Amino acid sequence: MILGTVHPTIPDAATFAVCAAIIIGGAFGVITARNAVHAALSLVLTLFGVAVLFIEQQADFLAVVQIIVYAGAIVVLFLFVIMFLGVDRREDVAHEPLHGQRPMALLLIVVALGGVIALGVGAHWATGAHAVAGPSHLKGHPNVYVLGKSVFTTYLFAFEATAALLVIAVVGAVVLARRPRMEERAKETGAPEEPAAVGGAPDGGEGAT
Amino acid sequence: MSIPGEWYLILAAALFTIGALGLLVRRNVLVMFMCIELMLNAANLTFVTFSRMLGDIGGQVIVFFVLVVAAAEVVVGLGIVVAIFRRRASTSADDLHILKG
């Protein structure tokens, strides 16, 4: 009983098939694109496919957050850095410095995929107690109500910890991307700054998230 | 009847392994970061699928936190990339061998 005895309806099956094709195609686009900008755009494709599959599984709020945070903030941040560094040129993908690394990687990946699927079949995919952290559906309440209630009661401490995490991340990004001051730069020996490629103000893109 | 959860799990496994493959074979740090995002998305899809299969909201809450962590990771990671690029004018992972003993 690998791929169910149940028969999904035609619209469901069509949605899943199209999204699966988009996700896998986008993922291959990311790993094969010579140009980093094309890779980022392929990543958007995959993220949209995943968002549609979230809706298909009644996780409406997460689908919206997926679009806003990933496509709206993270990919934009990627594109911003690609443009900022001026590395949007084609890369020589054919050149491989390590001999035989790609066949080895492919072999490893195929073994891993087969192993994971075999484990899933052996474990009948999902076993265990139902609704431990609370039911995923309450009658008459939308998904965002159920999710928000869980986040702000059961997982309140974790939620507040993420606030601290985000603050630390923003401060860390500012510190990392800051250009050293003149006197600090003078103290550094043998490592001249390369301001030609990176003119302008310190990286201000962190606020996006 | 909606799509059985196994289909989603197999799709997520495939997405994860594609991301891992990209992480292994690509040399551009930015593309390697994107491959990490692919793997995080595969994990998210798995969490949502299990949330539906087991009727448990916990899976969706964890996806919410994974999104936050992914955002923080990208911000710090890209900050590091910018800092390295200032010094070496390259985004190839092969050029980062200063710490090599």
Image (cartoon, coloured by chain):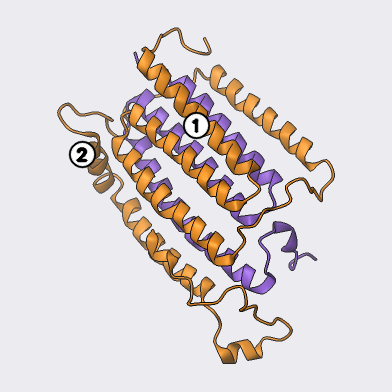
Chain colours: A orange, B purple
Return the chain for callout 1.
A
The residue that appears at 20% across and 39% down in the rendered structure is A145
Q: Residue at the far right: name it.
A: A99
* In-front residue for pair A165/B3: B3
* In-front residue for pair B14/A82: A82
Residue identified by numbered label 2: A145
Q: Position of residue A195 (x, y in %)?
A: 61, 79
Return the chain for callout 2.
A
The residue that appears at 49% across and 61% down in the rendered structure is A80
Q: Quadrant of the C terminus of chain B?
A: bottom right
Q: Amino acid at mark 1?
A: Ile
Query: Tag 1's secondary structure?
Result: helix
Q: Residue at the far left: name it.
A: A140
Residue A42 shown left or right of residue B25 in the figure: left
Residue identified by numbered label 1: A22
Residue A107 shown left or right of residue B42 in the figure: right
